[in-house]
Amino acid sequence: MRKILLAIMFPFLMLSCVDFETQTDVSKKLSIDVPKDWVIDKKGNEFISITTFSDTTANFKDRLVFDISWESDKMELTAENTKSIDSLIVSKGWLPKNQNLRNMNGFEGYYYDIIGYDSIGKFKFATNNRYLNKKGKEGTIFFLVTRYKEKLSAKDSVLVERIFKTLERK
């Protein structure tokens, strides 16, 4: 019983030691908290912005890579559009999983995971993907987390949700 409790609590304990700082994208459309010692890259213009961040001290295969982008065109999150997204994923030879439309953190969203191999076919990866819309705001946010393993670990999942909960649409 103690081992199970420790396995459940460990990811939360690890995160309690991490310092975060708020980052704003180049177009000033969103903000998100990022661990202070992670590398951050921002680019964009008035139509699109991309913020990428990762812990570069971790081994490549143990690293989480976050890509948060905002596009000025708003994508309606309908059943028809989500089927189109799934078709594109399958056409690339990847497997979409856990697809669902839901509201979370004040966003209307389409959530799905992908399991696949990178473009040269050497590394298996898992991604957690979210298309997000905010009522009364222009554009769509795409929240993507990649890990070069078959799935996110419990610690990864806790960190992803901790960071996602800080995402704000300005």
Image: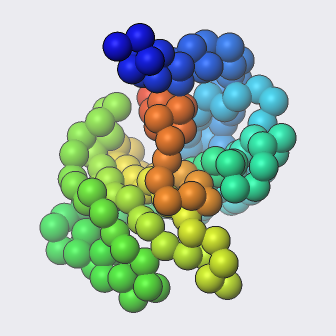
Q: Where 152 sits versus 112, above or below? A: above
In the rendered image, which quarter is residue 76 located in? Answer: bottom left
Q: Quadrant of the N terminus?
A: top left
The image shows residue 97 at horizontal and vertical percentages of 30, 63
Can you give x and y, in whole percent of width and height, for residue 120 in the image?
A: 67, 84
Quadrant position of residue 32: top right
Residue visible at 48% across and 30% down? 158
Name the residue furthest left: 79
In the figure, is residue 162 to the left or right of 80?
Answer: right
Residue, x 55% and y 64% (percent of image)?
125
Q: Using the image, determine if residue 53 lies above or below residue 118.
A: above
The relative height of residue 163 versus residue 20 in the rendered view (above or below) is below
Toward the bottom, the furthest residue is: 91
In the rendered image, residue 33, in percent from the top left (x then y), is placed at 61, 28
**Image-based side of 139 in relation to 52, left or right:** left
The front one of 67 and 114 is 114
Pinpoint residue 116: horizontal percent, then vertical percent.
49, 73
Q: Nearer the viewer, residue 159 or 78?
A: 159
Q: Nearer the viewer, residue 105 or 8?
A: 8
Q: Nearer the viewer, residue 15 or 136?
A: 15
